[in-house]
Every structure is written in C-alpha cells, then in structure tokens.
Amino acid sequence: MIELSNRARNVLKNIQGELDISPRTERKRETAAIANIEAWCDAHDIWLDGYRWGKTLRFDRRLLADIDAMLDSLKQPGLGQSLSGLSTVEQAKLGIWEDKNVREPPRRYRVLVSAPSTQHRPGFPAVVRETLEVDGRTLELAAFDALVQVENLDSVHELKVTQAELGGFANPLVVYRGDKIYRKGFDDLVVAWGRRFRDQRPHLYLGDFDAAGVREALSSGADGMLLPRLSWLAHEADSQHQRAEQLPYKKALERHCARLPAAHPLRDYLALILDQQRGLRQQWFAGPLEAVALR
C-alpha cells in the first residue's frame, strides 16, 4: 500500500497554509513529493482529474479536505498534526501510522542510574546495587541530597558501595554521565539539578583519579570528587595509572592547585599526581569514599 512520504506531508502542510490566503494553488507534477501525492490519491480513489492541468497539479480546500478525511479513515494523523519530537507511544495516540524519522528518540530522556537493591529476585544473584534505565524527567530530585556523576560505564554496573559510603550522604542520586545513547538525558538532568538546588545540594564526580580524570571533573561543572581516603589512596596509587600521554594536562592542574587556599584538601590529593606522577583508576577504588571539593 502506498504511504504519504514525509516530504509529501510537508508539501501538503505548506499548501494548507497557502490556501488560508488564496482559494487555490498549484505545484509541478514532476517533483517526487507531488508524484507521491498523486499516487496516494489514486490508490485511495480520491478524484484528481479536475486538478491535473498538464504539468501542474492544482489544489484547493476541497481536495485537502478529501485527503484529510481519508487520513482520518485510515487512522493516520491529519495534515495539521505534527509527529516531530513525539515518542512512539505519543504518535500512536494520533493514529496507527508511525514516522520513525521524526519521532522522539526512544532514549532521548533516559539515564542509567545505580540504585540500592531493595529486593531479591528468584534466579538472580544477590547484589548491593542494581543498574536501572529510567526517564530522567520522572525522578523526584527532592528525594536526593547529592548528584553523583559516574564517568565510566563499567563502574556503574560494578559499583558495590552502599549509599552511605558515597561521601556520607543519605540518598545520593548516582547516574552514568552518558555516551552517545545516554548523554543528552544526563545533560538535561544536570541542568534540572542545577536549576532546582542552585549549589545547595552538591554535584559530585566519580571517575579516574589521574590528570585526565581531575581535568574532566573540573570541566564537568561538578562541585567535588568522590575519592578514597587520602591515606589509603597514597598507599594504593600507582605510576601505571598515571599515563604519560596525560602530561599535557599537568600544567593546567598545577595552575589550578596554585589558586587553591593553602589548607584546601584537594592539594594533598593533587600532590600524588603532580609531584609523584601516580594515580588510580576508578575500578580500583575501595569505599567508603569521601567528597573532596574541587574549588
């Protein structure tokens, strides 16, 4: 069965606007969109003989009303209904026809969160935390006292600390910062968090402790980093985890460190990277983790 293409629908919408100020208008029949409209009308017994004039096809309000009536009978969206930006479910409410090219991407607002496991599911292993994919717009942000941005996807899935071990907060919202699938949803969530709390509730970064990781934390807009206790980290940090290709970031970190107050807690952490060229990847972290201010 012939369907109206997206281009044909857009042409008909433009024609609909023209007919608001003129009784008729016309288009060249040689274009692909008009050819599609003609074929669709013929397939659905919409009479066009009186509208075909040589190489042009004429339109008036009666013809568009016939097209709209046929769309309605086919349970398809009318010419005045735009599908752009709507989800599959929202498109379905307008009719059975689905336009995958203009619909809202299925994961546009989805985020990956790491939440405490609250139940045991028969057949599944017992876990401290579980990873959930949720619509970020549905989260009740007031229920959380901190936003934790997790940089590495594998760490989201492997995170085994309790809520209280994440900086001592009662109920932090732990979210993967996103890749090409989840990044837009995460970015929207960060904006919503900032607008809601305006620095009253922290945005923390959980990622690799190395020059690149600290640089990423600073550029992310986070207020602080979640890191192991300094005494433990000083013992476990390794030169193999501070890669040589990250040396270009060292000068920027040195400048940042110089701007910090003398007693700022981040200074001692940065000394491991800047003075000793040692770091530690997030996967090696052991809780409990502490919130260390970045500025």
Image (cartoon, helix red, strand yellow):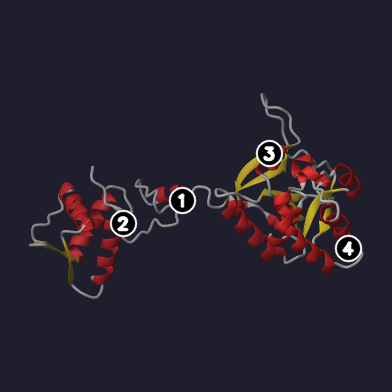
- Which is closer to the viewer, label 2 or label 3? 3
Task: Return the mark for residue 197.
Answer: none
Circle 4: residue type:
His
- Which is closer to the viewer, label 4 or label 2? 4
What residue is pinned by disc 1?
A: 87
Judge the density around disc 1: few (<14), some (14-19), many (≥20) Cα neighbours within 10 Å. some
**Percent position of residue 256, x then y:** 79, 65
Circle 1: residue type:
Ser
What residue is pinned by disc 3?
A: 157
**Percent position of residue 37, x then y:** 21, 55
**Mark nearer the N terminus (1 vs 2):** 2
- Which is closer to the viewer, label 3 or label 4? 4
**Mark nearer the N terminus (4 vs 2):** 2
* Badge 3 vs badge 4, beta-carbon distance below 8 Å: no
Q: Tell how many labels.
A: 4
Eyeballing the image, is 180 above or below 262? Answer: above
Residue 235 seen in this snapshot: yes
Circle 2: residue type:
Gly
- Which is closer to the viewer, label 1 or label 2? 1
What residue is pinned by disc 2?
A: 78
Judge the density around disc 4: few (<14), some (14-19), many (≥20) Cα neighbours within 10 Å. some
Left or right of residue 176: residue 104: left
Mark 3 residue element: helix
> CA–CA distance between discs 4 and 2?
63 Å
| Residue located 77% across and 44% down the image | 241
* Badge 1 vs badge 2, beta-carbon distance below 8 Å: no
Task: Return the mark for residue 264.
Answer: 4
